[in-house]
Amino acid sequence: MESQKREITLEEFKTLFDTYYESIKNFLYFKTGEIGLAEDLAQDVFVKLWENKKEIKLESIKSYLYTIANNLAINQLKHRKIVFEFVARKPGKESVETPEYIIESKEFHEKLKHALAGIPDKSREVFLMNRIEGFTYQEIADRLELSVKAVEKRMHKALHIIREKIGQKI
């Protein structure tokens, strides 16, 4: 029997918030490594739930909430990566950017965004934690409850995909 989508009530929403907020926040903390960011993203999860309250399957609500949380964390890490790349590659104020440099920079950033989007979630998470957050493989393994070998394998996969799509070492 297929479950029916229906609008959740305010009381149901409050119950869902009370039930899942802490675990969602902790999940996001493990993903991002920042408690403040995790709290903000956890609130965003419930904002999205409320915005989509008219078509919710209560039977799969936990999965739905964690999917939203995971997507928000990935988007946040992607954004940080792009900002980091921009800041790292931006020349000093005394230099003048040539039109060729500007075009190449834009093309590189587009390729990078496309490459990051093509990396499987687990590998992308390891890549961003290492390259953006600066975590060591051991720290990543501890946070994600993995072996260092598993982290190395995921990182290798991410770097392979990026090299394939961009053609440069990152």
Image (tube, grey):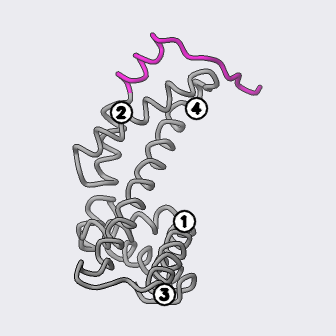
- Gap in Å between the C-alphas at discs 2 and 3? 42 Å
Identify the residue shown where x is 53% and y is 27%: 51
Point out residue 127 in the picture as x, y percentages from the top left corner.
39, 71
Where are the magenta residues, as a range?
1-19
**Which residue is at the front of the view, 97 or 34?**
97
Residue at position x 34%, y 54% in the image: 31
Q: How far apart are marks 4 and 1 (CA)?
A: 26 Å
Alpha carbons under labels 4 and 2: distance apart: 19 Å
Tell me which numbered mark, 2 or 3, is placed earlier along the sequence.
Answer: 2
Callout 1, which amino acid?
Answer: Ala
Q: Where is residue 159 in the image (x, y as percent from the top left)?
A: 45, 81
Residue 51 drawn above or below residue 125? above
Is 135 rendered above or below residue 170? above
Quarter of the figure with residue 128: bottom left
Residue 100 has which mark? 3
165 with respect to 22 (left or right): right
Q: In this view, does 38 lie above or below 47?
A: below
Tag 4 near tag 2, CB within 8 Å: no
Point out the tag, 4 or 1, that comes first from the N-terminus: 4
Q: In this view, does 66 lie to the left or right of 128?
A: right
Q: Do the residues labelled 4 and 3 touch (CB within 8 Å)?
A: no
Query: Marks 4 and 3: which is nearer the front?
Result: 3
Is 80 or 41 nearer to us in this picture? 80
Residue that badge 4 annotates = 60
Circle 2 Cα neighbour tier, 10 Å, few/some/many (<14 / 14–19 / ≥20): some
- The residue at which mark 1 appears reads as 117
